[in-house]
Amino acid sequence: MRIDVLTLFPEMFASPLSESILKRAQQAGVVGIVLANIRDFSKDKHKKVDDRPYGGGPGMVMMPGPVFDCFEHVRSLSAEPGRVILLSPQGQPFDQRKAVELSKEKRLILITGRYEGFDERIRIGLAAEQISIGDYILSGGELAAMVVIDAVVRLLGGALGDEDSSKDDSFSEGLLEYPHYTRPEVFRDMKVPDVLLSGNHGEIEKWRRSQALERTKQTRPDLLKDNPPEDQ
Ligand code: 4GX
């Protein structure tokens, strides 16, 4: 997969992309991530990329020119058109289903903004879909883009080492995960549940499933409504 990111703050991406799974996936050639600085495409002598909103009101709006020019440059770097995504609270909710869907694409072009928003002609002119990582307001789209990149790249074949697996993840079955334990058997008077030490794999699986279901009922009953698990 190729992921292009258009941003005013390319340096924000350095650390998250250079650790752990995202680092290994890039080294292994599973994904190539290319950052483009929207400010490099400003034609203004002060490198301006924002302006006051028509109709008045507080805040600034991202100008269409630099974003279009940056986009056209980035798109020309590869023959694959890719899926064009704006990060915005106005977008479709990002969830594990969306991550799986995006992980099947050959190329993603993520566009992140600052200020109050983009000039609407950016979304329309670039035929971009909008994705939101949740119902809260960030100071810019960069962290949202990193969330999408992380959730998508770890699903790509060969991105996870032997230690990790996406098969057992919360949400892969529409339920929260069961509780995990490792050594020691007793820690500060808290004991590992006997069933996990029993060696009875049938009983262990039953226990994990009932724990997962109970946690989901307690904390995220909405998940059961969306997608009822079998033999609930
Ligand atoms: N899920 N934000 C977007 C507003 C903005 C500025 C410039 C377009 C261009 C967010 C979210 C989010 C903050 C990113 C406001 N839009 N993004 N920005 N929640 O809160 O994705």
Image (cartoon, rainbow, N blue to C red):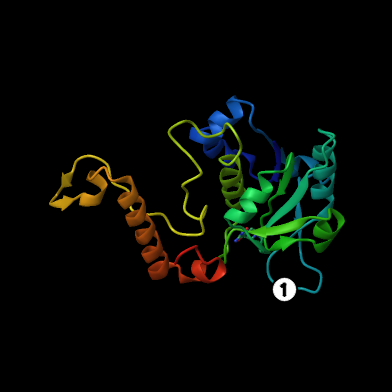
Residue 6 in view (yes/no): yes
Q: Nearer the viewer, residue 214 or 159?
A: 214
Query: Which quadrant would residue 89 be assigned to in this image?
Result: bottom right
In this rendering, would 139 be left or right of 40? Answer: left
Q: Is residue 21 left or right of residue 6?
A: left
**Viewer-side residue, 218 vs 45:** 218
Pinpoint residue 36: horizontal percent, then vertical percent: 72, 39
How crowded pointer 1 is (Cα within 10 Å; few <14, some 14-19, many 20+) is rated as: few
Does residue 160 sit above or below 104 in this rendering? Answer: above
- Res. 22 image quadrant: top right
Return the residue at label 1: 57
Residue type, mark 1 in image: Gly
Q: Residue at x 35, y 60 (%)?
A: 211
**Where residue 215 appears, x then y in whole percent?**
37, 64
Quadrant where the N terminus lies? top right
How far from the left and from the top, in percent, is residue 212?
39, 59
Where is residue 52? Give x, y as percent: 76, 64
Which residue is more in the foreground, 82 or 34? 82
Is the residue marked 1 within 8 Å of ligand 1, measured from its CB? no
Q: Secondary structure at mark 1?
A: loop
Answer whether residue 140 is visible to the viewer in this image: no
Q: Is residue 5 above or below residue 117?
A: above
Q: Is residue 177 above or below residue 57?
A: above
